[in-house]
Image (cartoon, rainbow, N blue to C red):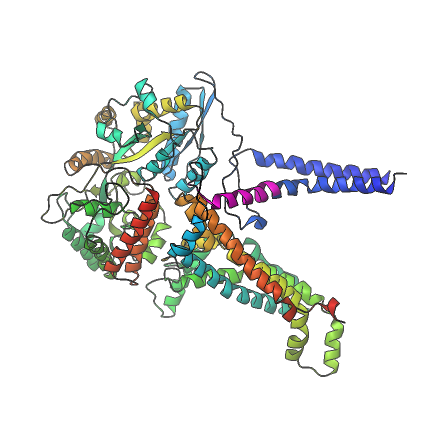
Amino acid sequence: MKSKKKIRQADNAVAYLLMTPWLVGFIGMWLIPAIISIYYSFTDFNLLNDPKIIGFANYARAFTQDETFVQALKVTVLYVLILVPLRLAFALFVAMLLNKKHKGLGLYRTLYYVPSIIGGSIAVSVVWKQIFGNKGVVMTLLSVFGIHQTTSFLGNPKTALSVIVLMGVWQFGSSMLIFLSALKQIPFTLYESAMVDGAKPSYTFFRITLPMLTPTIFFNLILQIINGFRVFTESYVITDGGPLDSTLSYVLYLYRRAFTYFDMGYSCALAWILVAIIAVFTVIIFKTQKNWVYYESEEG
Amino acid sequence: MKRSLKKITALGMAAAMAFSLAGCGSGNGRETTVNGGGTAAPSAETSETQANSTESAGEPVTLKITWWGGQGRHDYTQKMLDAYTASHPNVTFEAMPSGWDGYFDKLATQAASGSMPDIVQMDYLYITTYAKNNSLADLQQFVADGTIDTSKIDENLLNTGNINGKLNGLVLSSSYLSVGYNPEVLAEAGAAEPASSWTWDDFIKTAETVKEKTGKYGMAGGPVDDTNLFNYWVRQHGESLFREDKKAIGYSDDKLCSDFIKMWADLMAKGAAPNPDEYAAIQTLGEEGRPVVTGDGAMLTEWNNYATKVSGTNDKLKMVTPPMVAGSGTMGLWMKPGMFFSIAETSKVKKEAAEFIDWFVNSEEANDIMMAERGTPVSSVIRDYMVASGKLSDQQAAMFKGVEDALALCGETPDPDPVGMSEVNESFKNAAYSAFYGQVTPEEAAAKFRKDADAILSRNN
């Protein structure tokens, strides 16, 4: 009969062994490159030669001399601020619809979820480009209704970003599933007692559903904001940052600086600035948590 | 008994997972971008263990080679590689072709990780950057010991690969800016075919006539995709695009730039040239789908090998030298080195690579397959051979003859593009586009280009 300690040790060993592939990936593909990129951010490194340390010059340059940096930041923040509320709203709305029992429910759930799996891919981006681009489906359809455009939505600096946002909103499926499962966890007794008291549906939504969902909203909000800041594929494939940098996402600019302009050191600095920005957003949301997120377990 | 069975199963699964990692190691480093790793900058890949044998001649050697081009070029180049392997059985190739888009981004990553292919097709646009950073081998040693025969190559053209005293690339072909046109579309519009002596006013008139009479694009190219056409314009007016020390713009009057931008803006306003949105849609169609090839456009600005390149799809296209400035005899045109083959400094099989490059440039067998698709061959012997062989199509024969005519209109070949050129090109395009979109006047666009370009050049040179 092995001692309890030996059994625990043996179990731990197996646990570590099973974790090894992920650990190797995490350390090798994330931790070490992250540390190296912090180092690069303080250097002048053009990918072909050894990096030369230049202190905070890269960071200073971003904030004082780089207009494109400001533009990219503007585009990305705008993208996040419009996309996230829209996406969460749609996700919640559709989740509520799918919470009822009707025929074909499983089918609808799958259909709404599919865009978010395939959505961020290059193939879909190319299709999106065709649909909204010059002489594409949308432009042709509009002309059938008598609206003739000289430039498509994607060719117009004022509307190109909306098309990219639309693609993001279309991929609300993953948030929707999370909301759906959260909705199912709201105890039915709450609704029962409300119905007994003669509450209207809108009342139950704002007074029961929404407050009970706030932890999920909180989670989704943080996740979507972080992901929103990292938008790259749509921006790169559909418009390559154009027209006139109106869809130049931050990460796309960062990539271009690194690989097209041989400016890796500066690009690493940009990357860590992004980390800081996302961190700021996340901290703000966490700090305000007490004011609007309701955790059932805390209630006395 | 039960517990040890569980343990064995667990260990077995762990081993299976560990073994599955082995599948990731080989091959060209397929990148797994997992969602979790996002915010850190894409930093240099760790070098991978590539199958790269280092034995000398006679022993099996694998040459990694990369080039850009369309599908046609990929196909025939692969045939060339096979032909070389047939005559040199110890040499096999690992070919990594791609399109022009993203080719240099990929190369930069490979260079950073020390895994640049042995033979790299290189462009005048980037050769300075790679040369200055010692990423390319000095081919002079191979010229000196006879591995690469350069005796039949024009001295000036050969020297374009010479940067900082090292021969960083062997020029493969020469090319020059041209206007390609579809004679059928011109005939439809009742416009005359251009001659070498035509002027920019003739060009504009032709473009506008085509639009009026046929509704098709008079000029369907991308005049501001890079600064090459603008450089031609600048040179025609007796100026130079860059200052001698490459730290700033070389011409003094911004009117030169704003006139150029205004010319295209006017054509777009009349519908004779595609606006940026329409042009973006055209670009997705690929080389063989462009309006001039399909008969939806009359002219475009390109390098002189364009007609040959697309002759598979449309073999009626013709090329002519670009328009002259009325009343001026200044030679703006220049013989550009079309492209180079360079050898990576990190290559362990430089000698075998040099031998292949020599075969590529100087052998009749190679050029019979290539048929000047990459541009006019640099070797005078090969040029004579090809003309005499009677195998040239009409396009190719016209291209060879065109070189003779163009030489008369050429001035000195400019220095290779300075470091930071791709950024300068981007800023020129952005400045021009903001004028095309009507956000700024051409004058403001010209001033902005000067400001941005000066900053980029002084930072990099």
Quarter occupied by the C terminus of chain A = bottom right
> Residue A97: x, y in percent?
63, 69
Whether residue A37 is in magenta: the answer is yes
Q: Quadrant of residue B243?
A: top left
Q: Please state the extent of the stretch shown in magenta in the rendering.
A: A27-47
**Which residue is drawn at the image coordinates 19% and 42% (left, top)?**
B320
**Which residue is drawn at the image coordinates 31% and 52% (left, top)?**
B452
In this view, the residue farthest toward the top is B58
Whether residue B401 is in magenta: the answer is no
In this view, the residue farthest toward the bottom is A198
> Residue A291: x, y in percent?
64, 71
Q: Nearer the viewer, residue A27 or A128?
A: A27
* Rendered view: B136 above or below B313: above
| Left or right: A106, with B329 as reference point | right
> Residue B319: x, y in percent?
21, 42
**Which residue is drawn at the image coordinates 87% and 40% (left, top)?**
A3
Can residue A259 be seen in this snapshot? yes
* Rendered view: A3 above or below B441: above
Quarter occupied by the N terminus of chain A = top right
| Left or right: A87, with B212 as reference point | right
* Rendered view: A40 above or below A128: above
**Which residue is drawn at the image coordinates 52% and 62% (left, top)?**
A169
| Left or right: A4, with A230 as reference point | right
Q: Nearer the viewer, residue B59 or A64?
A: A64
